[in-house]
Image (spheres, rainbow, N blue to C red):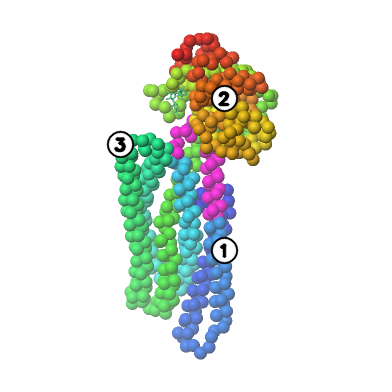
Amino acid sequence: MKLLELLSWGDNNLVIRLGVAGALSGVGSAALLGIVNTAAEEIADNGIDEVNWALAATFIVLAVVYFLAEVFLISTIARQIENGIDRVRKKLLSQIAVADFAQIEIFGQSRLFDSITQSTQNISQNSHMIGMAFRSLLLLVAVMAYVFWLSMLAFFIIVVVVGVGILIYLRMGKTLSMWFGKLHQVETILFDRVSDLFAGIKEVRMWSKRSDAFKVAFDNASDNKAEIGKKAQTMISRQMIMGISAFYILLAIIVFIVPVYSDSFDADVAKISTAVLFMIGPISIIVQSMSVLGMAERSAVRMMQLSKDLEDIREPIAEDGMPLSDPFDHVSFENVVFTYPNRDPRHGFELGPIDLSVKRGELLFITGGNGAGKSTLIKILTGLYRPVSGKVSINNTQLGPQSMSAYRNLIATVFSDSHLFEELFGTTDIAVEDAQYWIERFELAHVTGIRDGRFITIALSAGQRKRLALITAILEDRPIIVLDEWAADQDPYFRKKFYREILPELKQRGTTIIAVTHDDHYFDVADRRLHLDTGKLSELDLTDPRGRI
Ligand SMILES: Nc1ncnc2c1ncn2[C@@H]1O[C@H](COP(=O)(O)OP(=O)(O)OP(=O)(O)O)[C@@H](O)[C@H]1O
């Protein structure tokens, strides 16, 4: 069962612990049943004139053992499940963090979201049902052992009837599984629609035609989910009713039919009927929890598949690899080529071959038209994408799995779609005066600031947020800063300040800067200018007219 396998990740003793607690609880309740039956038999044989204190005391002791084992089992299972899910969630998150960037880009958000939120919820919300089902299963095994001891014939009749019931149940389960598969598909579509609505709320609000068409698409997705959900629920109810009915049929066979054909059965029919009645509770729990378990099992399968897929695209680099032996001096790219993994080769985009060397303290501009490959180049230069072929060296030492992480640590970035963290993760020990200096330099002191390792607010204009992103990169104090069209959101005044004052100031402090830009007025600020044309890189003179209006 994938669910148990998933929950045991990193805990080899889980199944053993559950087994011991379950066995105690199951044996305890079967022993209780045995005592009740023995007492009833004694009363039937001898009548009752005084309380059988020995049996009553054994009953009480067993009831206490059963109660304690039960409490222990249920709470252990709930705890194990929460711990298990916690481990799974953390494992998936760490796998996402070390997955190959170019591959994770094509993974699709809904699958990642589903596994980390919805699927874990499916398991944890129903953890008590999983625990109860497990306990009930063990209880059934114990009662069946008791029935076997009472009468082999009754045992085999129960096994046959339950076996037939299970077969029918499984057949129905297959259909149910198919419906659950469909349900998951329509849920994913609905999730995508909701994400679309949140991301595109402005566009939806601004045009009634789009709003109407979107509403139709959303309603369809919601209707589909409701329709398939209803079908799946009906199947679950049918399956449940069938499971319970099978037990009444079993009881009828034991009480009405078998005694007619078996003399030896007469003596024990009452005890066996009591045992069968005793089984109805756990059986109902198992039947009810089957659908929940089925859902949890399917969630477990999806999460394990995701984990496997993430493992397959794990970046072959050592996260805690070697630090670089010398301070950064220069980085060189030789014959470096990159292609996107999901790209149809007929419309393929190829970056390179790139031959380039960047020295410490240089200020480099990268220019080129839309789709020329600037952002792709930036991701190659920063080590986010791994080249398909070619060689990258730092200080004359070729980068490999052991040094890639140290290389990335040299580079602070502001991508064109950069994310601004409110908390300055990784730079909590910055000097207050330093932070204040840059906040003022970027003319943001009147709207925000830095307090206790976080920005006072990041609810600012797009241009102001970009300034905060650059402040974050500067405060990270790394030898290289890479910027992708940073000035695109800035007004002419601040754009000038950025090119004429801030970039030279950073350069003077010894920072190497690589910036993608379209601002041809300021090309003269750079030490060197690289130009991209459909993936081919060339170095141009600063006065070259290409890329200018
Ligand atoms: N994730 C991706 N998967 C497949 N192809 C991609 C992906 N991202 C970009 N491309 C393709 O790679 C080529 C270069 O894109 P890139 O984003 O690097 O261009 P750019 O020079 O930064 O363009 P722009 O100035 O418009 O931002 C384009 O043909 C683009 O369609």
Q: What residue lies at 30% left-to-right and 42% top-to-bottom?
A: 216
Which dot marks residue 72? 1
Measuring from the top left, give residue 94's x and y in whole percent.
55, 40
Measuring from the top left, give residue 182's x and y in whole percent.
35, 47
> Residue 451 in magenta?
no
Give the extent of the magenta segment: 80-109
Q: What residue lies at 69% left-to-right and 26% top-to-bottom?
A: 325
Q: What residue lies at 46% left-to-right and 24% top-to-bottom?
A: 339
Q: Is residue 413 above or below residue 312?
A: above
Residue bearing the label numbered 3: 209
Residue bearing the label numbered 2: 482
**Whether residue 446 is visible:** yes
Q: Nearer the viewer, residue 14 or 356?
A: 356
Amino acid at dot 1: Phe
Q: Is residue 333 above or below residue 232?
A: above
Measuring from the top left, give residue 78's x and y in whole percent.
53, 58
Contact (Cβ within 8 Å) of mark 1 with mark 3: no
Earlier sequence position, callout 2 versus callout 3? 3
